[in-house]
């Protein structure tokens, strides 16, 4: 197959042009050519068409080969250019080659023309291929170094950053026009000794092992980075470094550390509360029994009442610890959070006082949430109290409830959760605010910035526990001198809000005559429960553990109406016991009790709303009321 060749011939002789044409065709080319003999015609031909080569006579009246070559260069065209001549001396040949011609050929040796054009065409093709490869390499390198993920710099050991990609410049807040930058001046003082060590290591090794440091951004803030790199081959002073912004990783590490710390504190708090609840059960229970036996005029009555009151206050503290550690049994209901807030307004006004202005902003189409009504009221009260204390000279308290959608990015970055529809409860104040150190401890039990005697440090930890146990998220936003905003996100649920009925209250025990199997490994609690049940008229069968309880179920010939069992016991917990005991006694009802109920209750596959449960510590009234509730087959809603 013939290769097409387009040649522009610059010659005033038609015969010479024909000879050139014949020689090129003899070389096997499908030739297209045009002959011109003036500068104007050559310029028009170059502008109008594309050419593969130019062959020019050295001597043309009024023009000539060198003028044709100059015109070709002026046009910026890179084409093989061959000069032919009838009489070309050595000096002229040198002049022609210096001017930029690719070859010169005598007219009586035109056989050299085809190899000369092919040689230059090949050189040109290789040059194009090299240029294309270079452009591709440069584009690939640019794609590699310019992404806004990893910063790349060229720096010298004397303290200058001479080159940088956009990612690094964005990282430190400088513009490209501000290069070179002084990396030693951008480095905080505490990190400079580390940089000096790296420079010393470079003297014996070409590699910069990855290490962490900080840069001072142009605005004065700091950015944590990871740096690694190596010396450039062309220099012993310059190195190329890869710089990774660690801001997000550090934030996630802090978030993980905080989560782990809160989990550990929660486990400790739950364990402490469990042990205290067993003791408090005995204190408050026996106080109740003694108070019922003494008249109001008895000299010991007031002292005993103080013991009872102290026990009640201690029980309230342990309940808050259980909430924080997610070990409190909640009674969730479908709620309209707006109604909960609205019904609390009057109480809130009395709580915060006249100096604080209360503003509520409630979405009229607010979605529903599933939460414990009493616990949500406690959340609002605790946050309002916290806000009041942050505004001793007065200010504004703004409570807002609105529907909100958390997208994937925000949900993952802030809470580690996916997107979803939530109801947001926001409690904001215009108070003194908090610094970052205070915010980092905000939800820890017993952490407080208040004066001694002004708070237990359990208010915000209780809020945290209630929100987490309700399946929600909480976030605090605060700056010193500006104020604080707590935002709570609770998952939206479908359905109408449940009606709330208040349980009747009273101090008298509710009596009965049924047979109760009491299972409790703590002797002090077991004795108290037996005394209460005996006083209430019940027949009591007593067991110190699950094995003893199962033995009673097997050998007792009488009917057992109800088993009252602790949840957390050695060797076999209350749920496993109930599974085996109800096989032996299918008609027997079960009431669980515990001072520590989280994992033991719900990790056994038993849903919270499927069990009858009595929280320790309990009073004589609490125990007998719950007992009658289960025996009579009624499950009243309590708030």
Image: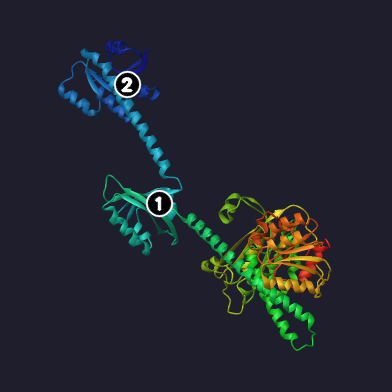
Q: Would you call the spot at circle 2 few (<14 residues within 10 Å), some (14-19), or many (20 or more)? A: many
Q: Would you call the spot at circle 1 few (<14 residues within 10 Å), some (14-19), or many (20 or more)? A: many
Which residue is at the far left?
90
Count numbered badges in the picture: 2
Which residue in the structure is indicated by mark 2? 53
- Between 270 and 290, which is closer to the camera in this rendering? 290
Marks 2 and 1 in Cβ contact (< 8 Å)? no
Residue 245 lies left or right of residue 596; in this view the side is left
Which residue in the structure is indicated by mark 1? 243
Pair 2/1: label in front: 1
The image position of residue 133, as x and y in percent, is 36, 32
User: Residue 262 sits in which quadrant?
Assistant: bottom right
Q: Residue at coordinates 41% horizontally, 54% vertically from top-left?
A: 226
Of the two numbered discs 2 and 1 on the same chain, state the one appearing first in sequence: 2
Q: From where the camera sits, is residue 288 visible? A: yes
Distance between the Cα atoms at labels 2 and 1?
50 Å
Element type at marker 1?
strand
User: Residue 575 sits in which quadrant?
Assistant: bottom right
The image position of residue 158, as x and y in percent, is 29, 56
Q: Residue at coordinates 35% horizontally, 35% vertically from top-left?
A: 134
User: Residue 566 sits in which quadrant?
Assistant: bottom right
Q: Which mark is residue 24?
A: none
- Between 463 and 213, which is closer to the camera in this rendering? 463
Q: Residue at coordinates 27% horizontally, 45% vertically from top-left?
A: 234
Element type at marker 2?
strand
Question: Which quadrant is the N terminus positioned in?
Answer: top left
The image position of residue 452, as x and y in percent, is 58, 79
């Amino acid at each position: 197959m013939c290769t097409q060749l387009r040649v522009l011939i610059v010659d005033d002789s038609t015969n010479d042009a024909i000879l050139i044409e014949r020689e090129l065709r003899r070389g096997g080319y499908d030739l297209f050519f045009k002959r011109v003999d003036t500068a104007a015609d050559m310029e028009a031909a170059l502008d109008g068409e594309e050419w593969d080569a130019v062959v020019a006579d050295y001597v043309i009246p009024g023009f000539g080969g060198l003028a044709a070559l100059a015109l070709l260069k002026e046009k910026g065209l890179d084409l093989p250019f061959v000069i032919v001549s009838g009489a070309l001396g050595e000096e002229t040949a040198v002049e022609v080659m210096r001017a930029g011609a690719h070859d010169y050929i005598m007219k009586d040796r035109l056989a050299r023309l085809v190899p000369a054009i092919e040689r230059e065409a090949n050189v040109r093709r290789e040059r194009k291929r090299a240029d294309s490869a270079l452009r591709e390499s440069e584009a690939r390198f640019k794609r590699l170094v310019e992404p806004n993920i990893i910063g790349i710099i060229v720096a010298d050991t004397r303290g200058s950053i001479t080159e940088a990609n956009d990612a690094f410049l964005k990282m430190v807040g400088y513009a490209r026009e501000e290069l070179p930058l002084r990396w030693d001046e951008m480095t905080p003082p505490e990190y400079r000794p580390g940089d000096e060590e790296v420079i010393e290591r470079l003297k014996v090794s070409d590699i910069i092992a990855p290490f962490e440091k900080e840069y001072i951004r142009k605005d004065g803030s700091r950015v944590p980075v990871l740096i690694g790199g190596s010396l450039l081959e062309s220099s012993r002073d310059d190195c190329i470094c890869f710089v990774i912004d660690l801001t997000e990783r550090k934030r996630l590490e802090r978030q993980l550390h905080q989560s782990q710390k809160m989990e550990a504190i929660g486990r400790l708090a739950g364990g402490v509360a469990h042990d205290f609840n067993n003791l408090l059960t005995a204190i408050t229970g026996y106080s109740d029994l003694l108070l019922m036996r003494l008249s109001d005029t008895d000299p010991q009555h007031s002292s005993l009442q103080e013991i009872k009151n102290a026990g009640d206050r201690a029980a309230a503290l342990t309940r808050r610890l259980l909430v924080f550690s997610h070990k409190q049994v909640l009674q969730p209901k479908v709620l309209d959070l707006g109604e909960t807030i609205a019904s609390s307004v009057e109480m809130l006004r009395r709580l915060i006082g006249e100096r604080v202005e209360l503003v509520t902003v409630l979405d009229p189409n607010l979605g529903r949430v599933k939460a414990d009504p009493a616990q949500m009221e406690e959340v609002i009260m605790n946050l309002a109290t916290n806000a009041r204390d942050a505004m001793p000279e007065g200010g504004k308290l703004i409570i807002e409830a609105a529907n909100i959608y958390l997208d994937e990015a925000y949900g993952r970055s802030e809470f580690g959760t996916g997107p979803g529809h939530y109801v947001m409860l926001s409690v904001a104040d215009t108070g003194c605010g908090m610094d970052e150190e205070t915010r980092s401890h905000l939800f820890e039990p017993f952490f407080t910035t208040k004066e001694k005697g002004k708070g237990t440090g359990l208010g915000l930890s209780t809020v945290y526990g209630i929100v987490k146990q309700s399946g929600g998220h909480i976030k605090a936003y605060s700056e010193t001198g500006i104020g604080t905003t707590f935002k709570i996100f609770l998952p939206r649920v479908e359905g109408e809000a449940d009606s709330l009925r208040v349980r009747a209250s009273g101090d008298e025990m509710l009596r009965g005559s049924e047979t109760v199997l009491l299972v409790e490994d703590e002797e002090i609690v077991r004795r108290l429960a037996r005394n209460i049940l005996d006083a209430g008229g019940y027949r009591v069968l007593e067991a110190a553990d699950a094995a003893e309880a199962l033995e009673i179920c097997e050998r007792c010939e009488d009917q057992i109406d109800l088993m009252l069992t602790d949840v957390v016991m050695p060797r076999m917990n209350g749920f496993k016991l109930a599974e085996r005991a109800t096989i032996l006694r299918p008609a027997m009802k079960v009431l669980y009790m515990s001072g520590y109920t989280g994992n033991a209750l719900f990790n056994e596959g038993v849903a919270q709303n499927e069990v009858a449960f009595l929280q320790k510590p309990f009073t004589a009234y609490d125990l007998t009321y719950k007992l009658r509730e289960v025996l009579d087959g009624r499950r009243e809603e309590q708030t």
